[in-house]
């Protein structure tokens, strides 16, 4: 009894000591980050940064953010099955991988670098299955030169943003479409990013600008070529990059803010915009620049909730214009396995019926319909439709039908695939993804 009491007492004292030690170091770290974001660089801020790194407080903030993200998976109420938990933690790994790319590895505005922000290992917030997302860090006081070659990718979009998605929220500063770029006959271009206007291609920076986001959407996954892009800061010459204690602390802090805050923020947005809708219905098309959507793009969304023997038909006039797609996302708003399964379709891949209508079928089983969308066996999830630089379209409609009656609800001109044809399409999807994200493929 006495021994148990002694052990308990010592554990309590040790816990108190640890608590006050960590709290003390976190206080140092908090002071340091306030100094950093006030723009001050002095011996005090450098000293605090050094203390935060040496003590481990800077690192502990990232660990705490990961712990908080894990609590979200447990407490959100989204997970109803073992697979839901698997998908949830897989989603967090993607969020972490993406945040390290955006806020740690490619986070030097003095020596900007165009890195991959989202790909098949960095999927979150309904990332476009046709996309290659790139980013580069910026300073609002800087002047940057972006140059390269447009090439043949279907859509190229450039967007300057400011703020942290996981903290106070990101907002759009300026936008430009690849269709607006001035290029030479070979597709070569140069663009300036700065506060002051420049002739030719120019993107505005303001006092909040800290990131350049680049969207590339591929229609033909086999043959289109990504844009060639390079960036450099041209208003001053900086010393070769070396990560200091202050810089390490800043990058860990930005990464922590995203990892700890983004999953909850994304959930709030999707609950409001998608899961508030009646299941198996679809919203009207609207622009979503308030959520960092492309200025050229309209979005419509819905959520499916289907039994094993049901199918959801989405019907709309085939859009006319540059680009459209539809994709399925799981309950964590994580794009699904678009490399190995047909969980998305775009205007190059989908089949249009003889009456000019587009009919898409969401179902748990492969119905043989060319425009089938695979749920991966999930009873519920979300879907999103994108229209980019489209001149003629209709709103979409939906209807749930018994799977056994599917053919009765589709026109005679509906295209059906053999198992061999489906297998070849899936093979080509995999090769297309490898080509997009691995240029050596």
Image: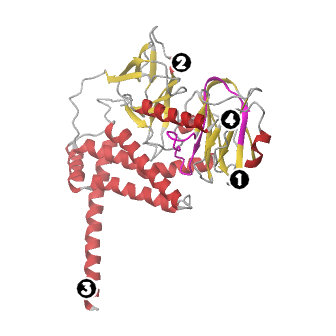
User: In front: mark 3 or mark 4?
Assistant: 4
Whole-number angstrom distance, CA of label 1 to CA of label 4:
19 Å
Q: Is residue 325 magenta?
A: yes
Q: Residue at the location (73% across, 36% down)? A: 315
Q: Is residue 243 left or right of residue 325?
A: left
Question: Is 30 or 368 nearer to us in this picture?
Answer: 368
| SS class, disc 1 | loop
Q: Residue at the location (28% across, 46% down)? A: 249
Tell me the quadrant of the picture where the C terminus can be found.
top left
Does the rendering let one see residue 402? no
Q: In this view, does 55 lie above or below 352?
A: below
> Which residue corresponds to mark 3?
6
User: In front: mark 4 or mark 2?
Assistant: 4
Q: Is residue 239 above or below residue 126?
A: above
Expressed as whole percent of the image width and height from the top left, the position of residue 88 reads 49, 54
The dot on residue 309 is 1
User: In front: mark 3 or mark 2?
Assistant: 2
Sort mark 1 into few (<14), some (14-19) or many (20+) by Cα contacts within 10 Å: few
Expressed as whole percent of the image width and height from the top left, the position of residue 130 reads 52, 33
The dot on residue 416 is 4
Question: Is 241 or 398 nearer to us in this picture?
Answer: 398
Whole-number angstrom distance, CA of label 3 to CA of label 4:
74 Å
Expressed as whole percent of the image width and height from the top left, the position of residue 362 reads 66, 44
Sort mark 4 into few (<14), some (14-19) or many (20+) by Cα contacts within 10 Å: some
Q: What stretch is highlighted in magenta?
A: 313-342
| SS class, disc 4 | loop
> Which residue corresponds to mark 2?
179
Whole-number angstrom distance, CA of label 3 to CA of label 2:
74 Å
| SS class, disc 3 | helix
Q: In which quarter of the image is residue 384?
A: top right
Q: Is residue 400 left or right of residue 287?
A: right
Does the rendering let one see residue 406? yes
């Amino acid at each position: 009894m006495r021994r148990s009491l002694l052990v308990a007492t010592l554990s309590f004292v040790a816990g108190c000591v640890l608590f006050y030690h960590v709290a003390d170091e976190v206080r140092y770290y908090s002071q340091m980050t306030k100094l950093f974001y006030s723009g001050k660089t002095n011996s005090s801020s450098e000293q605090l940064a050094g203390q935060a790194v040496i003590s481990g407080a800077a690192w502990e903030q990232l660990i705490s953010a990961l712990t908080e993200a894990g609590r979200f998976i447990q407490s959100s109420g989204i997970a109803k099955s073992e697979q839901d938990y698997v998908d949830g933690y897989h989603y967090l790994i993607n969020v972490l991988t993406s945040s390290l790319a955006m806020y740690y590895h490619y986070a030097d505005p003095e020596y900007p670098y165009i890195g991959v922000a989202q790909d098949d290992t960095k999927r979150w917030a309904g990332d476009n299955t046709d996309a290659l997302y790139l980013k580069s860090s910026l300073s609002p006081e800087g002047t940057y030169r972006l140059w390269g070659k447009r090439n043949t990718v279907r859509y190229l979009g450039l967007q300057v943003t400011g703020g942290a998605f996981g903290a106070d929220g990101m907002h759009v500063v300026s936008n430009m479409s690849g269709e607006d770029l001035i290029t030479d006959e070979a597709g070569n271009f140069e663009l300036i990013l700065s506060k002051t206007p420049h002739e030719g291609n120019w993107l505005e920076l303001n006092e909040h600008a800290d990131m350049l986001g680049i969207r590339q959407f591929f229609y033909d996954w086999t043959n289109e070529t990504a844009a060639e892009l390079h960036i450099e800061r041209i208003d001053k010459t900086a010393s070769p990059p070396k990560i200091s204690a202050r810089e390490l602390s800043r990058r860990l802090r930005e990464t922590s803010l995203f990892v700890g805050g983004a999953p909850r923020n994304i959930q709030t947005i999707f609950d409001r915009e998608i899961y508030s809708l009646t299941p198996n219905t679809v919203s009207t098309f609207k622009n979503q620049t308030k959520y960092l959507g492309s200025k050229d793009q309209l979005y419509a969304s819905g959520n499916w909730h289907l039994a094993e023997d049901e199918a959801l038909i989405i019907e709309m006039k085939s859009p006319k214009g540059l680009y459209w797609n539809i994709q399925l996302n799981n309950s964590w708003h994580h794009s699904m396995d678009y490399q190995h399964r047909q969980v998305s379709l775009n205007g190059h891949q989908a089949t249009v019926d003889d009456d000019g209508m587009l009919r898409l079928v969401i179902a748990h089983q492969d119905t043989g319909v060319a425009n089938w969308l695979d749920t991966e066996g999930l009873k519920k999830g979300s879907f999103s439709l994108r229209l980019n630089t489209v001149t003629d379209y209709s709103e979409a409609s939906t209807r749930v039908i018994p799977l056994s009656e599917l053919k009765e609800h589709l026109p005679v001109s509906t295209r059906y695939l053999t198992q061999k044809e489906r297998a070849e399409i899936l093979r080509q999807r995999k090769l297309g993804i490898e080509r997009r994200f691995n240029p050596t493929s």
